Amino acid sequence: MRNIFLLFFTFFIATNTTLTQTAAELRMDSLRVEYIRNYKDIAMDEMDRSGIPASIKLAQGILESRAGTSELAMRASNHFGIKCGKGWAGASYSKHDDEHDKRGRAVQSCFRKYNSVVECFADHSAFIRNPDKEYRYGFLFQLDPLDYKAWAEGLQKAGYSSVDFYAERLIYYIEL
């Protein structure tokens, strides 16, 4: 499974670089490649342990953390934008996000804070595999782990993100 994953990502990275990219696009491409290089082993270990495809985990990490450069990733090692939620007893990090009070003013959101990226990736798996969320994410584990499109569409259907085109973005980052 690991060799198939690495071959798949290497193919897409190698065949989708164009000569007409802007400096910003080249920088983002470089950040994505570096992100994959840095975290592919963690993602593959999590895939073996939890059943969540490494391609999906890496695409989510790239998207949610701007390839590890977001404030949340840099200051809280949170690469998936996972909020504290009920029952979270770990460390937290507060920042403005998409939450608003009754008057429409932005309020601080509570996000989970991790000691390391490894801890973050493992908690992301635990978050999706949580038996309390079986009704929401359980169907994903019936999908072929190599069918990243079905997984991306499933995460969107399950409401992982409020972004309407979340699946398209994940697929884009996998195929880029």
Image: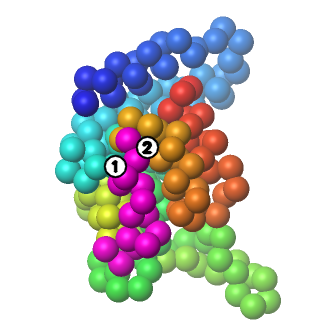
- Which residue is farthest top? 19
Q: What residue does disc 2 label?
A: 56
In the visual, does 101 lie left or right of 63? right
- The magenta stretch spans which residues? 131-144
Q: Is residue 58 left or right of residue 47?
A: right
Which residue occupies the foreground of this view, 19 or 136? Answer: 136
Single out the residue that lies furthest toward the bottom. Answer: 102
Q: Is residue 31 above or below residue 72?
A: above
Q: Residues within 10 Å of mark 1 (few under 14, many from 20)?
A: many
Coordinates of residue 174 in the picture (x, y in percent): 50, 32
Q: Amino acid at mark 2?
A: Ile
Q: Secondary structure at mark 2?
A: helix
The disc labelled 1 sits on which kind of residue? Ile
The residue singled out by tag 1 in the image is 52
Side of 141 relative to 62 (left or right): left
105 left or right, relative to 69: right
* Disc 1/disc 2 C-alpha distance (Å): 7 Å
Residue located farthest toward the front when viewing the structure as drawn = 142
Q: Residue at x 60, y 22 (%)?
A: 26
